[in-house]
Every structure is written in C-alpha cells, then in structure tokens.
Image (cartoon, coloured by chain):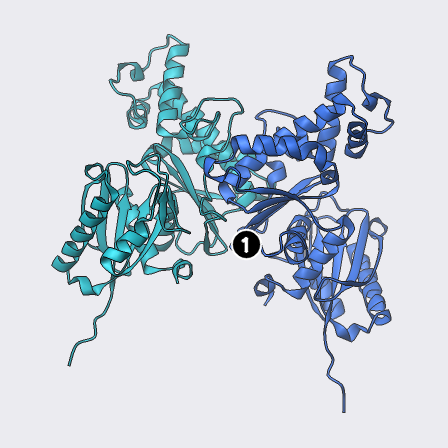
Chain colours: A cyan, B blue
Amino acid sequence: MTEAIIKNRVIGVDISLDATSYAIVDVRGNIIARDGFSTRDYPNVSEYVSVLSERVVMLAEQNGGYEGIRSMGISAPSANILTGCIENPPNLEWKGVVPIAAMLRDRLGIAVALGNDAHLAGLGEHVFGCAHGMKNFILVTLGHGIGSFIYSNDESHVGADGFAGEIGHTCVEFGGRVCGCGKKGCLEAYCGAAGIVKTAQELMAASDKPSLMRTVSKLTPKAIAECCDKGDEMAIEVFDRTGRILGLAMAGYASVIDPEAIIFAGGVSKAGHWYLGPAYEEFEKHVFCHLRGHVKFLCSALDDHERDVLGASALAWGIKEYSLFK
Amino acid sequence: MTEAIIKNRVIGVDISLDATSYAIVDVRGNIIARDGFSTRDYPNVSEYVSVLSERVVMLAEQNGGYEGIRSMGISAPSANILTGCIENPPNLEWKGVVPIAAMLRDRLGIAVALGNDAHLAGLGEHVFGCAHGMKNFILVTLGHGIGSFIYSNDESHVGADGFAGEIGHTCVEFGGRVCGCGKKGCLEAYCGAAGIVKTAQELMAASDKPSLMRTVSKLTPKAIAECCDKGDEMAIEVFDRTGRILGLAMAGYASVIDPEAIIFAGGVSKAGHWYLGPAYEEFEKHVFCHLRGHVKFLCSALDDHERDVLGASALAWGIKEYSLFK
C-alpha cells in the first residue's frame, strides 16, 4: 500500500537585480530551509530558469522531498500578476516580456504564480505581519524605488493591467526634479534613496553650515540617518523635508483609498524614526478631514530579507489570491 | 387562493441640498414613475422622513401598488455606506449624524440602503451606463464639489471608513488656493465650479485683453463654456488650465488604481469638449509609463437627472452591493 503524499510546503522565490533568494515555507510562514545565488550570473533567462529549477529541487530533496512541494510563488520587479510575466524590467538584466511563471511551471511540474515585489511584500505583511486581519490597507516600499500595494475589501487590488500601486511615479512637484523614469517631479525623485541623497547634496551646496554629512565618503540614506543619530541638524533637515513630501503624497493616496493603515517597508524605512514624524504631521494636515486620526502609520513587522520570500510563499499557498490562478 | 406578490420594483431616492427626487425603478433601470420636492422645506429630519415615506408610498400605490416594492436605495452627500448614516453634511441643512436608512426602514418596513452621491453615480454607471461590464474603473463627479468612486476587482471600493474616493480634497498645488474645506491647493479649488470661475476672474484681472467673459452678468462654468463656443480665447484658456490640472491629478489617481477608464459625470462635465482634450494630454504625459494609452477618458452615458436615482435603485436591487446589507 502506498502512502498518500501530503503536499504541505511551498517554495517562495524573491528575484532582485543582485540576488535571487528561495525558501521552503510551511503554511504558518516557517522557513524550513533557504538558499540563494547571484541573479547577475545568469543574463540568459533560460539558463537562469534551469539553474533555479535544479537548485529548488535539490533544496527540497534535502528537506523532506520534492514530492511534498505544493506550488511556487515568485516576487520580482516589473512582474505582472495577471500575465505571469516579468515585463520590460528596468531593474533586471533580462529584456522584453519574460513568461517566467510558465517557464518554471513547465520545468517543475507544479503551479507557479508571480507577483511584483511591492504586491507580495503587502501580501506577506497581510498573511504573516502587522496587516494581519486588516481588510483595507496600503503598503509602501521605500528603497531605491518606491512601490506600493493596495489591499481593498479583503482582496489585493491589482488593477485592470496588473500595474496598480505605482505611487513612486506620481507627481508631487509640478516641473520638479527629473526622475529616473524620465518624468519630472515624481515622488521617487524626492523620497527614493537617490532622491534623499540629492536633497542632502542640495542642502550642503546651499549653505556653508557645518555638517557631518560633509565628512561622509559615500552618502546613502543610511549614512545620513547615522549623522541624524549624532544630532547633525542638516541631516535631520534632509529627513524632515523627505518626510513632509512623503506625508503629503500619502495624504492624497489615503484620501482616495481610505485605508486602516499605511505600512512602510524597505531599506529606507529603517530610518523611519527620522522622517515618519514629519511625514505624519504633514499627512494629518492634508488628508481628507473625516480621515484625520483614523489612518495608522506602521513600520513593517517582518525582517526585510524574509518579507519577500514569505510574500511569495503566501501567493504560492494561494491565501486570498488563489482565485486568480484557478 | 391568494396570488403570490412579486416584488419587482425598487425605490431610488436622490437627496441634494435643493431637491429630493424619488422614482420607482424596475430591474432593467426603467423609471416607472418619478416625483420630487424641495429638501430645504424640511430642515427637521424627522418631518422630512415622514413626508418622504408618505409620498413614496403614494407614488407606489398609484403605480402598481406598494406591495410590489422590494427595497429602497438612497443617494446623498456625506452618506456613509457602512453605517447607513448621513454624517455631518456640509451641503445639507441637517446637522450631526443622521441615521436616515434606519429611520426610513422603520417607517416603510422594507430594506433601505444608503450610499454617497459619487459612489451611487458610479454604481449607476456600472449597472446601467458606459461602465457596464468593466471590472476596474474610476468615476469622477465634477460639479460644485469633486467626488469620485473606485470600482475595483468587480466590487465597489468604499474604504475602511466608507470615505474612499475623496479626490476633490487632495492637494494639487502645495500652498495654493484656499479650498472650501479650509485646506490649501485642493483639486476642487481649481476644477470645481467655483474654482473654474476663479480662474476666469484671475485671467481677466491679469490682462486688459478683450474677452466675452467680461460681458457676462453671472460667470458660471456653463457661461464660460458658451464664451468658448463663440471662440473666446481667454475662456478657452480657462478650460485649458482647468483641464491640465485635472489631467495631472487623474494621472496620479490612475497610476495607483490602474483603471480601464475614468468616467466624468456631473454638471461641469458638460463642458468636457473644452477641457477633456488638454486634460488627456496632460494625463498621458504624467501617468505611469506602462499605462500610457491604456486608460480611456469617457463622459457619463446617463442623463444627469436620472443617474443618481438609477444609482440608488442599483443599490436597492443589491446588484454587486447586496452582500454589504445582508
């Protein structure tokens, strides 16, 4: 008599420009095993898919067997949840439209679902983090880029084309700074990592005041936050300005969405204690009057390295999202 | 043997500052009969509820009998769909929180549901108008105020507190014009009826150029549009500026929502041919790159007088919305 195979694990994969992380995750979000490799080593996507497939099967075989794997979820930039494709990614070496979910499904013989990084960070936060139980929230990822995710009526809001949540490229200053996307005045040009550094450079250039930032060899949001921690006024001003622009943008966003909370995640959000105060102050000034005092500002409860694979595994488990992939 | 009563009609009610309209509507959106009275005549809400109840029953008795009425839907400003209350309406004479759905339910003995005017205009457009079949769209009402409605994943997005869609009071110009809500730079202060008139006044004050607008006894968006129709350059400039601000705001809105279409309704939208062109031009410049060419700008397919009662009747029929009121 053969034993019934219980498929009680999924694979969560997080693809970024530098690294690919993958993990075996159970239904409670416990990471059973994880590994990774350099994404840049495989500019050819077919080769990448072969390597990822082999490594995933190997990790599964070493940890309870591949036959116990139910499905795979993938988090990637420029990923379209509606098509399962990575579409013209500016932040990956692959070009054009890459049907990565279908390619992996063919190799692995299991269901594979794909979502963009902000979307799956939000889903991870909902299933395993501080948005647990919320029916309406926004998650904003602050890093090199700024992305976001809308959870509405207890469902992911992905939009008509799968591109909902692109708050980073909404205009916060008409005719303002040129953004990486080619437009002017985008939120990302002020509150993304490069934008914050640019604000610091502008402040340093505009006066002769002393600042610890002038002694830093490579300015990054982290380095600027460290100057803040030492009481540097100009560095504090950098995050104050960043926070006020972020807060104004969030006020407009919340006024149309009416969320329970806005949750901040991503590398830059670690300096949250320096800019979320001014951000919330500006938010309360500008949000629709009936929402004042109603919208919580929260920082992600999940470890940055874990959020994306957990989000991808939540997608794989099909929690809330399953109907999209039936 | 008694005949089974078929409840095949609903009542749709539209409450505004000046007028209350009510109609008996069948499931296809045919208005069987309609009537109305002045809202202002009843500053006491209990009296208003008595009069509305009596008149609704009378209209039903004259048109097939009250026993054929299934339910009632109400469209009102400042209405909260989650509570069934009109909450602190700045545009009605009643003050505080008015539990109007419960009051009418007690009087009439039928289910009564309440939604805000922009929400129900959107629902009406979805059930009976040009958004029919769309799963993701935004409806924007342009009139004295600017409201909006988000339809997401084939459901109404009402938000955590029932206040989603408040695009009129999002900031389009930091530190700009003072809005009726007390904040500065709101979209409504530029693209609402009073905002458009203000732009006309500013343009007239800023130069000595001749303009037909200078001869108009009472400037309104309609009067300005009539000057445009006669080829008046300054009037055309008024709507060009209005359109560009509207288009920029819609670009940000669409970038986070990713709708199939933005549908414009309300009094000011009648001058659409003068400002939707510039609005769409600005929209395409500023919307997230992947959405360029993907979002349609449409004008409401429904008659202004009918949209709100039809939206209210759609709510009453429980199409899509029924689960909220079970």
Task: Tell me the crowding category of disc 1: few under 14, some 14 to 19, or many 20 or more residues within 10 angstroms, Cα based.
Answer: some
Q: Nearer the viewer, residue A53 or A136?
A: A53
Amino acid under label 1? Lys
Q: Residue B178, can we see it?
A: no
Task: Judge left or right: residue B290 versus residue B30.
Answer: left
Residue beneath the point at 39% across and 63% down: A326
Quarter holding residue B237: top right
The outermost residue toward the left is A62
Q: Position of residue A109 (x, y in %)?
A: 25, 61
* Left or right of A261, for residue B282: right
Residue at mark 1: chain: B
In percent of the image, x 27 and y 52: which residue is there? A12
The reply to whether residue B106 is visible in this rendering is yes
Label 1, on which residue? Answer: B135
Q: Is residue A186 left or right of residue B301?
A: left
Hey, which residue is sitting farthest bottom in the picture?
B1
- Residue B58 lies in quadrant: bottom right
Is B56 above or below relative to B144? below
Judge left or right: residue A204 versus residue A161.
Answer: left
Foreground residue among B296 and B217: B296
Q: Indicate whether B34 appears above or below A257.
A: below
The residue that appears at 78% across and 25% down in the rendered structure is: B231
- Residue B49: image location, x then y, percent: 78, 60
Q: Report the number of discs.
A: 1
Residue A256 placement (x, y as % from top left):
56, 43
* Residue at position x 35%, y 28% in the image: A193
Report helix, strand or loop for mark 1. Answer: loop
Quarter of the image with the N terminus of chain A is bottom left
Q: Position of residue B325 (x, y in %)?
A: 60, 64
